[in-house]
Image (cartoon, coloured by chain):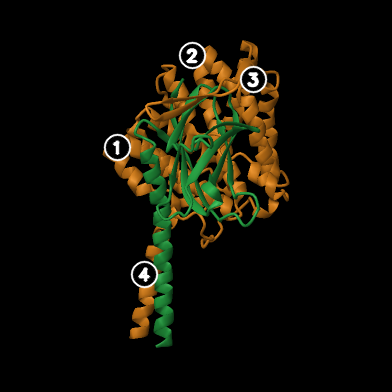
Amino acid sequence: MIKQFLFLLIGAVMIVSCSNCSNNSNKKNVFGNTNDTVSADSALPVAPQAVENLVQNISSPVEMAALIKSLGAPFAQKYMAPTNTDNFNTSFSKALNLGIYGADLGYLNMYNKTSSVIQYITAIKTLADGISVGQFFDFSTLKRLATNNENIDSLMYISIHSFNVMDNYLRKNNRSNLSALMIAGVYVEGLYITTQVAKERPNKKLAENIGEQKNIYEQLLLILKNYRKDPYFASLIADLETIQKELDPVKITIEVGAPISIEKDGMLTIKQTSKSIVNITDEMLKRIIKQTEIVRNKIIK
Amino acid sequence: MKNITFILAIIFLSLGYTVKAQTEAQKVEMCSKIAGQEATYVKDIIVDLPAAQGNEKIPSSKTTLILRKDNKYRVTICTDDDSPGKGYVQLFDNETMLGSSYNVSTGKEFKSFDFDCQKTGAYHFIIQFLEGKAGKAVVIISFLKKL
């Protein structure tokens, strides 16, 4: 009797312990793998120093959405991916589209469109569960905040933090390939929404921002190419390289200057005086917009 | 009796694990609140560094992030209460240091500093602890506004 009670107690403690796993990025993967088409073994050996130097935040939906909003562009549901997750049967497509929905969620949050948030967090939860990282996505809190239309700041914070925790967990548990796909998804959707806005509301600042993606794009491909032995990755890289081809003619020059530090009211501000000058023609922009549409629509199919 | 001790050990280990996990998330949340209401959280960096040994280089953590042109960012550092060393964060564009939460010449420390970014690209965040002491800290990178 005592034995049975103790076993039950251990079981209960383990369950409680795991319900908080979302907050621990260092724990080992105790969950089974899904029907993986992407194996961690597909990664090429990369020197630890190179891995350390890989950019950890290629794209954040916050900055993309803030840019669009600052230009006065209204919210448009049509820019967002449909939330039909049934088509995503592999870990590869789940991770990639998890990133796509992550960018869409950032866009929704920035425009306070809480009524649509639930369908996106539901889709995110489904895909996250599909690659065994659903425990890091605080679905119930997000749902409550969105349903009650309360505390938009918390909604934004928990959404972004959940993605960061999922990303950290994947990196630290030898599943960086899935992390790379999530990053790629966020990036492609961000670029897609930005280019769609530029298509409908031509704007010099927006065009320059799109042109500047040339530099980020190289970093993204660098990360993905680490897994190019995997045929799914090879195919994605080939698709993304078609966008890179259109970004290539964009000319970016840098004016170098020394940073300026200003201290005011106890607050330190660093002003960068080095700046980039982006030369992008209307024709270049059109081609980038077109190619981004093709690649992104292929991903969400 | 042995069995009960073993079981209790497992229970305490599990609970300890949970508490640690909660603490890490709480630290990030608290530090992002310190960044201010006007700051939108983008990324956190959690560091736990050992003390420097002898004449060796001061241990540091390096994280590379993409920052975008025409954005104002805020970098906030929160050293753990029980950390032996006080943490500081430096921002680099390639080899050039753009700014730091600690001014070496004056000894002045800042909880946060803002960065007006004029060039989209990869930036490095280097975190260290004063005098090469061991330390634990959280750094929050937040977005403030479009410039």
Q: In front: mark 4 or mark 1? A: 1
Residue in the picture at 50% in, 34% down:
A60
Q: CA distance from mark 3 to mark 4?
A: 60 Å
Q: CA distance from mark 4 to mark 1?
A: 33 Å
Q: Earlier in the sequence, mark 2 or mark 3?
A: 2
Q: Earlier in the sequence, mark 2 or mark 4?
A: 4
Q: Say what amino acid the circle numbered 4 marks.
A: Ala
Q: Chain of mark 3?
A: A
* Residue for badge 4: A12
Q: Earlier in the sequence, mark 4 or mark 1?
A: 4
* Residue for badge 3: A256
* Residue for badge 1: A151
For residue B18, above or below residue A54? below
Residue in the picture at 67% in, 36% down:
A221
Q: Position of residue B113 (x, y in %)?
A: 46, 32
Q: CA distance from mark 1 to mark 2?
A: 31 Å
Q: Say what amino acid the circle numbered 1 marks.
A: Asn
Q: Position of residue A127 (x, y in %)?
A: 49, 47
Q: In front: mark 1 or mark 2? A: 1
Chain A visual colour: orange
Quarter-of-image position of residue A117: top left
